[in-house]
Amino acid sequence: MHRFFIPRSFSGEMYIEGVDARHISKVLRMQPLDKLQIVSDDGVSALAEIASIDSERVYVRCLEKLAESHEPRVKLVLAQGLAKGEKMDFIIQKAVEMGAYSVVPVAMEHSVVRLEGAKAAKKVERWQKIAESAAKQSKRDIIPQVQPVQSMAQMLANNNLQTKIIAYECEDKVSLKTALQNAKAVGDMQELLLIIGPEGGISEHELALAKDAGAVPVSLGRRILRAETAGLVAISAIFYETGDLGD
């Protein structure tokens, strides 16, 4: 069943407009009495039926609230070093599908891509649309935010979460599993910042900044993973460890 986000507080009768309304009427060719799912701005999910359609709006009548949550127990923020080409599109799409709460594109010292000003803002706008599409497809209860492009220092200042983990290829003592178990032992697993480097890796200066901010360097295993693979592997492991891939 198709799911649509409505940027308004929940009420018994609501409307969908803009791109989503045109998609419903012109692409999906849905009709009055057809069923769909809606998620309001205050986080309420509901089963609804179409009451009427005009050229720009689809009016829906809510039939019942849906109690089941599709969100992970842990609010996971992925701080991803800027990757080149379409790799960032892929990373953001899959991270949202898997349950990331937010994604921060980080301009790191070894990033090949350089984004500033209007160019960076345009990219973030595109990535936000990708996140919204992925949230709909995976039946998320929220649309994860793609934050503005930031430096490592800015990202750490803006995302001061309880648990911080940085994947570092030269780390050979602490595994991701060990770091997660240690965090769970002291009760710091409600929110988590996961830092992943770009193709060129994380610089020693950036590693020092992260460690000073409380981030724990971890190994993701014996093999070197690509920039577009590392974050997804880590997200899977984190959600498995916290029970979100099955208890």
Image (tube, rainbow, N blue to C red):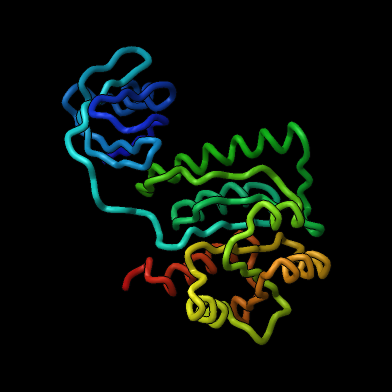
Please report the residue visible at 22 percent of the width from the left and 38 percent of the height from the top.
47
Front one among 154 and 130:
154
Residue extending farthest top: 55
* Location of residue 161 in the rendering, given as x and y in whole percent from the top left corner: 59, 61
Residue placed at 24% from the left, 50% from the top? 67
Residue 32 % position (x, y): 19, 22
Query: Furthest-front residue in view?
Result: 186
Left or right relative to 131: residue 215: right
Picture residue at 32% right of the left edge, 26% below the top: 24
Q: Is residue 214 left or right of residue 35?
A: right
Image quadrant containing the C terminus: bottom left
Q: Does 223 appear above or below 151?
A: below
- In which quarter of the view is residue 78 placed? bottom right
Q: Does residue 128 appear in the picture of this structure?
A: yes
Q: Quadrant of residue 3?
A: top left
Instruction: In this rendered view, identify the residue nearer to me: 81 or 194.
Output: 194
User: In the image, 185: left or right of 24?
Assistant: right
In the picture, which quadrant includes the N terminus?
Answer: top left
